[in-house]
């Protein structure tokens, strides 16, 4: 998407080059601190609305990642057919069973059951493992206004709500190139040919922080601020990996990180966890369920990495 030429003969504005997303950057941009005597409420509540009867594991992966990122409390809303199994698999969570349509999507009639959480939840992760795009979009569109005070992470079919209504809260979207093509009407090849420009253009159009995933991942804000991350590993291209990333970002947002802040930390932690697993198991073959277990130690390590400059930017430029 190219900007129109200026009418007054001035040189066209060139967006700033993206900042490299590195450990050094995050050392100058630490996560919100939690007092030693703070309780779990101080680290926020995260709501994960995810899964389907065919993919209940997506909810489990995203929810586990949110807790490993440091969220204080976890609520999972999942199809009623799989809710009990999820409650047993992750006993740390409160689990709410939601009605589904005949085609496997969530029913909008259950949005009212989640409405009371709107005043308490700091972050919401919507979409991992959802089925039936049409019903998912209707459900997400009904649910979003109930969580105006929360940061919302949209993944998978939940992202299809973008552009259909203005977002009333901070939103993060996590598409890969194929999903970005589906959302925008571009070809996958066009998305990959200029991923940075695509991420920037659609972040501005949607009013969301967009993490366009790939061998190089670009994170873009609506104002054009962008980060570039080149440190991915091949093994991260595996089933459930994206669900885990969405959960990490949601957990970090629950702790108080803003959209770009949570996204930057989530992308780098996800990649470094993959690198650690590659050292243990080999470049390929480690599992998405193993990624969250690496995260607490990585956060601890990055949090104690000395900064090269004393200043801590509110937002990287």
Image: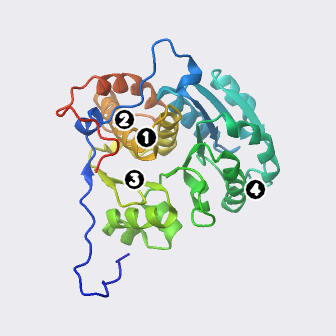
- Gap between marks 3 and 1 measured at Cα: 15 Å
Please state which of the two labelled residues, at mark 3 or mark 4, is closer to the viewer: 3
Rendered location of residue 272, percent (x, y): 32, 34
Picture residue at 32% right of the left edge, 62% below the top: 196
Rendered location of residue 170, percent (x, y): 53, 50
The numbered disc on residue 213 is 3
Report the residue marked by disc 1: 262
Rendered view: 96 above or below 303: below
The residue nearer to you, when weighing 111 against 63, is 111
Hey, which residue is sitting farthest left in the picture? 308
Q: Is mark 4 on a helix, strand or loop?
A: loop
- Gap between marks 1 and 2 measured at Cα: 10 Å
Residue 296 in view: yes
Report the residue marked by disc 4: 103
The residue nearer to you, when weighing 121 against 178, is 121
Picture residue at 64% right of the left edge, 50% below the top: 130
The numbered disc on residue 269 is 2
Contact? badges 3 and 1 (CB < 8 Å)? no
Please state which of the two labelled residues, at mark 4 or mark 2, is closer to the viewer: 2
Q: Residues within 10 Å of mark 2 (few under 14, many from 20)?
A: many
Lower sequence index among marks 1 and 2: 1
Please state which of the two labelled residues, at mark 1 or mark 4, is closer to the viewer: 1
């Amino acid at each position: 998407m190219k900007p129109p030429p200026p009418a007054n003969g001035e040189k066209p504005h060139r967006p700033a080059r993206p900042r490299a997303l590195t450990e050094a950057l995050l050392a100058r941009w630490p996560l919100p601190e939690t007092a030693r005597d703070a309780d779990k409420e101080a680290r926020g509540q995260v709501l994960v609305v995810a899964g389907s009867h065919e993919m209940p594991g997506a909810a489990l992966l995203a929810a586990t990642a949110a807790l490993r990122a440091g969220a204080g409390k976890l609520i999972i809303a999942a199809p009623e057919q799989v809710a009990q199994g999820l409650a047993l698999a992750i006993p740390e969570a409160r689990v709410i069973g939601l009605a589904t349509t005949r085609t496997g999507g969530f029913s909008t009639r259950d949005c009212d059951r989640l409405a009371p959480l709107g005043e308490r939840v700091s972050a919401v992760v919507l979409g991992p493992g959802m089925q039936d795009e049409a019903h998912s979009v209707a459900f997400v569109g009904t649910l979003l206004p109930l969580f105006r005070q929360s940061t919302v992470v949209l993944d998978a079919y939940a992202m299809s709500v973008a552009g259909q209504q203005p977002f009333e809260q901070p939103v993060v979207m996590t598409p890969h190139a194929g999903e970005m093509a589906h959302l925008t009407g571009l070809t996958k090849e066009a998305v990959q040919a200029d991923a940075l420009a695509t991420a920037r253009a659609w972040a501005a159009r949607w009013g969301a922080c967009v993490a366009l995933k790939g061998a190089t991942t670009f994170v873009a804000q609506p104002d054009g601020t962008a980060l570039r991350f080149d440190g991915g590993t091949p093994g991260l291209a595996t089933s459930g990996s994206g669900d885990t990333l969405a959960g990490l970002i949601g957990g970090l947002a629950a702790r108080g990180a803003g959209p770009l802040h949570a996204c930057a930390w989530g992308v780098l932690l996800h990649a470094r966890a993959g690198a650690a697993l590659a050292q243990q198991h080999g470049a390929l073959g480690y599992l998405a369920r193993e990624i969250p277990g690496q995260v607490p130690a990585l956060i601890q390590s990055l949090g104690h990495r000395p900064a090269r400059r004393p200043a801590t930017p509110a937002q990287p430029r």
